[in-house]
Image: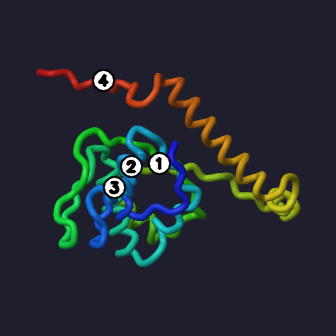
Amino acid sequence: IYWSDDVTPAAFVSADPSTGEEELSERDLLPKIRHKALVNPDMAGWFSGSYEQIRAVMAKIARTMDGSGLQRDTGAQGSRGYAGDYRFAVVGATTPLDRRAWDAMGHVGNRLVFYHLPRKTDIKEIADDVFGGEEYGDKVGLCRSEITDFVGQVWRFHGGYGSVKWPSPAQD
């Protein structure tokens, strides 16, 4: 598992003009998350802005999520990137999305799966969730631990990274 609080499309393969290739390679996110789960507890940045901004972010991230690497070409660094098996999973959280975000994501295919928490209406229950029990930092630590354990259990149950074998269509 690789944890990050803020992921931008440019982070997958860096192109800072003032940095050399070796340092860029150390900064690149894609090799760090290869065959891992990227956990982003606040994905609001992926889904905010105008329709065009969201669609641009989704298009860049979708290409990376295809799992076959990412090759970028910039005027500052030329061509650099990664090819081959760079599959990874993303586990993230965000507030409910508006129609604009759903419409923009509709153009990138089925790379994202959403789970909606049930809506609570009892103000006392909501207040207890926020203010009751453990301190905020302890709650964050518990969430981090539970997510790490859950993803680890799923991967162990299925035999580790890349262990699920999908049946191939019959050859004629």
Q: Amino acid at mark 1?
A: Val
Q: Earlier in the sequence, mark 2 or mark 1?
A: 1
Q: What is the spatial separation of the Cα atoms under label 2 and label 4, in whole angstroms?
A: 20 Å
- Circles 3, 2 touching at the beta carbon (< 8 Å): yes
Q: What is the spatial separation of the Cα atoms under label 2 and label 1, in whole angstroms?
A: 10 Å
Q: Position of residue 7 (x, y in %)?
A: 46, 61
Question: In the image, which disc is placed on residue 111?
Answer: 2
Placement of the C terminus among the 4 image quadrants:
top left
Q: Secondary structure at mark 1?
A: strand
Question: In the image, which disc is placed on residue 62?
Answer: 3
Residue at image mark 1 = 90
Q: Earlier in the sequence, mark 2 or mark 4?
A: 2
Residue at (25, 25) in percent of width and height: 168
Q: Amino acid at mark 2?
A: Arg
Question: In the image, which disc is placed on residue 21?
Answer: none
Q: Secondary structure at mark 4?
A: loop
Indicate the quadrant where residue 8 lies.
bottom left
Residue 107 appearing in the image: no
Q: Residues within 10 Å of mark 1 (few under 14, many from 20)?
A: some
